[in-house]
Image: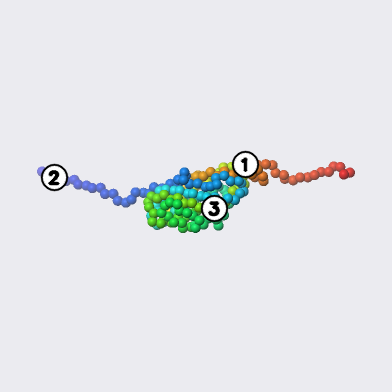
């Protein structure tokens, strides 16, 4: 007689890998979206991202990258001026990289959830560049999931276009596309006058 007993079990352990952060371009915006060249305006920003883990005790960075030649006044962007509209985060700090036209808002986990949706708003004083003809440019938004300093890790959301900004040419000045007077010389060929 042959007796065979087969018993087996399969056990799974561990956690499912986190989904990467997702930028919600439909619920992220900048106003005003149309400005005059060379004008200084107070811009209002709303940034929205989902699939964030706000329960892990680390930071996230919400970053806005404006096109070249926008002047951002860093004193106008403060942690106290950032409002958390949704999500389990607090505001840790803000920074402005004027050379690259970047605004960073660092958010710290505040007993949130995984996944979580985070929506913040803030304002900044910014001067639009001079343009040669009416111009439309794109602002970009990125999320650094673990605040490591880059936007290329597995769960990061690299920069994506999320808002067009129209810059209106004023029609004056060297950037307006109109001819510019370089020099004027007046000749008087009549010595009797």
Determine which residue is flagged by label 2.
3
Position in image of residue 29 (x %, y %) = 50, 46
Eye-nearest disc, 1 or 2? 1
Question: Local crowd at mark 2 within 10 Å, few (<14), some, or many (≥20)?
Answer: few
Position in image of residue 184 (x %, y %) = 76, 45
- How far apart marks 1 and 2 lie (CA) works out to 89 Å
Determine which residue is flagged by label 1.
133
Position in image of residue 142 (x %, y %) = 47, 49
Residue at (53% x, 47% y) in the render: 31
Residue at (53% x, 55% y) in the render: 77
**Could you tell me if the residues under marks 3 and 2 are in contact, i.e. CB atoms within 8 Å?**
no
- How far apart marks 3 and 2 lie (CA) works out to 79 Å
Q: Specify the quadrant that holds the N terminus.
A: top left
Q: Nearer the viewer, residue 95 or 167?
A: 167
Residue at (45% x, 55% y) in the render: 107
Residue 153 seen by the camera: no
Residue 119 seen by the camera: yes
**How many marks are shown on the rendered structure?**
3
Helix, strand or loop at mark 3: strand
Along the horizontal axis of the image, is 118 left or right of 13? right
Determine which residue is flagged by label 3.
124
Helix, strand or loop at mark 2: loop
**Could you tell me if the residues under marks 1 and 3 are in contact, i.e. CB atoms within 8 Å?**
no
């Amino acid at each position: 007689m042959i007796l065979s007993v087969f018993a087996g079990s399969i056990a799974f352990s561990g956690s499912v890998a986190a989904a990467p952060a997702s930028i919600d371009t439909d619920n992220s915006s900048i106003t005003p979206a149309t400005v005059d060249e060379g004008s200084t305006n107070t811009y209002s920003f709303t940034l929205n991202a989902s699939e964030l883990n706000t329960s892990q005790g680390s930071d996230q960075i919400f970053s806005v990258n404006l096109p070249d030649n926008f002047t951002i006044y860093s004193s106008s962007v403060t942690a106290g001026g950032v409002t958390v509209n949704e999500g389990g985060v607090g505001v840790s700090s803000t920074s402005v990289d004027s050379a690259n036209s970047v605004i960073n808002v660092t958010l710290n986990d505040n007993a949130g959830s995984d996944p979580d949706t985070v929506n913040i708003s803030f304002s900044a004083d910014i001067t639009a560049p001079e343009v040669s003809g009416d111009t439309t440019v794109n602002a970009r938004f990125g999320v650094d999931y673990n605040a490591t300093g880059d936007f290329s890790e597995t769960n990061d959301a690299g920069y994506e276009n999320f808002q067009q900004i129209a810059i209106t040419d004023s029609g004056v000045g060297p950037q307006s596309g109109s001819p510019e007077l370089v020099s004027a010389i007046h000749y008087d060929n009549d010595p009797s006058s």
